[in-house]
Amino acid sequence: MATPKTAEEIRDVNTRYHTGAASHYDAKWGIDWGMVGRDQVLTKVEKALGGPLPHFGRSLEVGAGTGYFSLHLLMAGAIDQAVCTDISPGMIEALQRNADELGLDVATEVCDAEALPFADESFDLVLGHAVLHHIPNLEQGFAEFFRVLKPGGVVIFAGEPSRNGDRLAQLPKRAATTVAPAWRAALRAGRSSAGDSDGGACNHELEQHVDVHAFVPSDLEAVAGDAGFEQVNVRGEELLANWFGWTNRALEATAAPEDVPMFWRQYAFRGYLALQKVDRSLLEGRLPATIFYNLLLSARRPA
């Protein structure tokens, strides 16, 4: 398909892709609903805030996907009430199934982040994970986040691709593509069909069109500040872990999912967690945010 050019085309392709990918999304990205996943979420939120996680009353997650952040925050007791939105009906259905299986009560709404159907000053926290880079009009999005937050409320976004980090990540992806045939032969894994983890070949074709931004930290600082937020802080997260993760993910994407052995999945998962710790203890906070793959943002609406 042609590259989407208008905001409406971008919203449409994001809706269609994420609805088609929803049923396989948790498996594709290795989303964990146990203590490992909870530790991942809490650590990211604390890093975004630059300190211990406070307690929030009512939260709104924008682009909630299958519920990874909000459901873990509910299970951890960090929030009292969760409202989860997504532009994709399929993602909201998957989120509700996850909430039901976990015994959690959430409110859900299919809506556009640029036109939130909620009253002014109705949330203590607005958050999102890997969503800002899908939103066509970020200025309008942040105006909405500001509007629905109570005075003194907090906005947190994690998992946003940095422009330089995204370029650096192309290196391990290309290397993995080169060695993939030998890797599959060593594991005796068959080749994947296009879209095995994305809801089919047609849906897989849409994936290259859903990302519309990659950021430098000053981009995010400016858009939040222009919306009226204060105490704006942007941090970088994960360098070695993302190189390792993208290499393995690119390899796995070339193989039939059922042929990837458990020992490999365990190696990839544990290696990623180990390198996260190295990043956190040695690199994050010492190197410029712009070289990391992920950016995290926190800000506050003036009290």
Image (cartoon, rainbow, N blue to C red):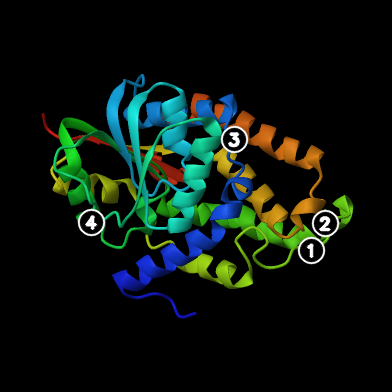
Q: Nearer the viewer, mark 2 or mark 4?
A: 4
Q: Which residue is mark 3?
A: 32
Q: Secondary structure at mark 4?
A: loop
Among numbered discs 1 and 3, the one appearing first in the sequence:
3
- Identified by mark 2, the residue type is Arg
- CB under 8 Å between discs 2 and 1: yes
**What is the spatial separation of the Cα atoms under label 2 and label 4, in whole angstroms?**
46 Å
Q: Which residue is mark 4?
A: 115
Q: Residues within 10 Å of mark 2 (few under 14, many from 20)?
A: some
Q: Nearer the viewer, mark 4 or mark 1?
A: 4
Q: Nearer the viewer, mark 2 or mark 1?
A: 1
Residue at horizontal 61 percent and vertical 53 percent from the top: 24
- Identified by mark 4, the residue type is Ala
Residue 143 located left or right of residue 255: left
Instruction: Return the residue nearer the eye: 38 or 275.
Output: 38
- CB under 8 Å between discs 4 and 1: no
Q: Which residue is mark 2?
A: 184
Q: Nearer the viewer, mark 2 or mark 3?
A: 3
Residue 262 position by quadrant: top right
